[in-house]
Amino acid sequence: MGIEEFAELAARLMSQPAAPGHEELVQSEVRRICTENNLDPVQDRFGNFVIRLRQGGPQRLVAFSAHMDHPGFEIIRRLGPRKCLARFLGGVGDDYFRAGIPLRLMPGNVPAVLGRRVGKQRTFEVTSRSILDRVSKFAVWELSDFVRRRGRIYGRACDDLIGVAAILAALIDLRRNRVRCNVIGVVSRAEEVGFFGALSLAGTRELPREALVVSLETSRELPPVKMGKGMIIRVGDRASIFNSDATRYLTEVGAEASSRRKSFRWQRALMAGGTCEATAYQEFGYQTCAVCVALGNYHNCASSLRIAEEFVDAQDACDMAYFLTEVARRAGDFDQFVGRLPARLRKLRTQAVRALRKGDAGT
């Protein structure tokens, strides 16, 4: 999928506001995109989507996972004709919550502003600019949904709708090109409050234990990673190091993909800016690895305590989708790819033993 088509897909998803537990608009858009592209989105009893695509002969099962929600406000109760009480869900530092910051009440896209803090918890008064004629369920920062500028995608919720877009783009491409594959696309809920969607799915029949799980994220840009230098094979997060064999497989696929497509670039790094769904899946026994793209203004936290749009490099994001198609396409070669390093080391060991016995290791 080219960058224009990918950007259109991302724009459709990012134009649907969401907060943890309030992903209905994104769910509806995912369903529409799948229907348009002859994909079958099955919604489990927890509200996660499980999108299965199996084509051709036997192939290793690969599951790609990303989440629909983004930090936001949950409305607790109404306080008056123009005022309600809201609780913030997700990881944003206390100093960013300043009275007067513009918000958007949902449903209805009702303009509002953040009011005073109530109590010690992250609970706030929210005041609408007009009389509320419907029940508000959640609120989001009043920021641009989607803007593409100077090679970057800006929006309130790059995290993790760029990941969702990459999964859908990969599934569309795999189906369109009739690639032999055995893939599950997992689009989960409520990640920002403790991986609720992923944890509810882990261990169920919808996600078989033999699946190779690849978690997708947008992750805070930290050295040595550089935005615009390629998507990232993520060896771990703040809490975990991911499965060595699975990560080695991704690395081998990346090396082959870059040799076949010269424009494709990738990086490899520990992205310790946060904890992702890969940790949750790994702790429940799945062979797990992860990929991501570098993210600016993580969770909308910009410099000088400003709330601002997140951003990613558009080509990095598009390349992540392409990489997923390669991961699915080569899954039948998993053991062969993973076995390359041990084979090289065994050959080197034979050479080492022969050289050291002869006393000519330095020749």
Image (cartoon, rainbow, N blue to C red):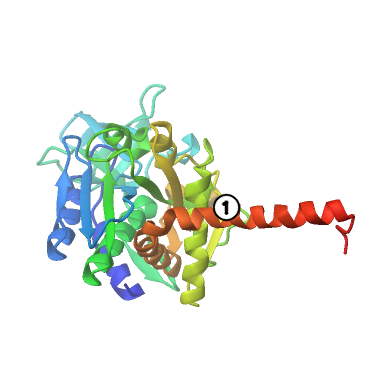
- In the displayed structure, does residue 289 sit left or right of residue 352? left
- Mark 1 highlights which residue? 269
Residue 74, quarter of the rendered image: top left
Judge left or right: residue 347 versus residue 108: right
Q: Residue furthest left?
A: 133
Residue 351 lies left or right of residue 73; in this view the side is right
Instruction: Determine the image quadrant of residue 134.
Output: top left
Task: State the residue at coordinates (31%, 34%).
Answer: 202
Front residue (pair 56, 10): 56
Work out whether residue 332 can be spotted: yes
Q: Nearer the viewer, residue 5 or 338?
A: 338
Nearer to the camera, 194 or 185: 185
Task: Give how far across and how far down residue 170 sits, in percent.
Answer: 31, 63
**Left or right position of 172 against 269:** left
Q: Residue type at mark 1: give it.
A: Ala
**Pointer 1 local density, CA inside 10 Å: few below 14, some 14–19, many at least 20:** some
**Position of 213 relative to 15 (above/below):** above
Q: Which quarter shows the N terminus? A: bottom left
Q: Residue at x 21, y 52 (%)?
A: 52
Residue name at image x 23 percent, y 39 percent:
138
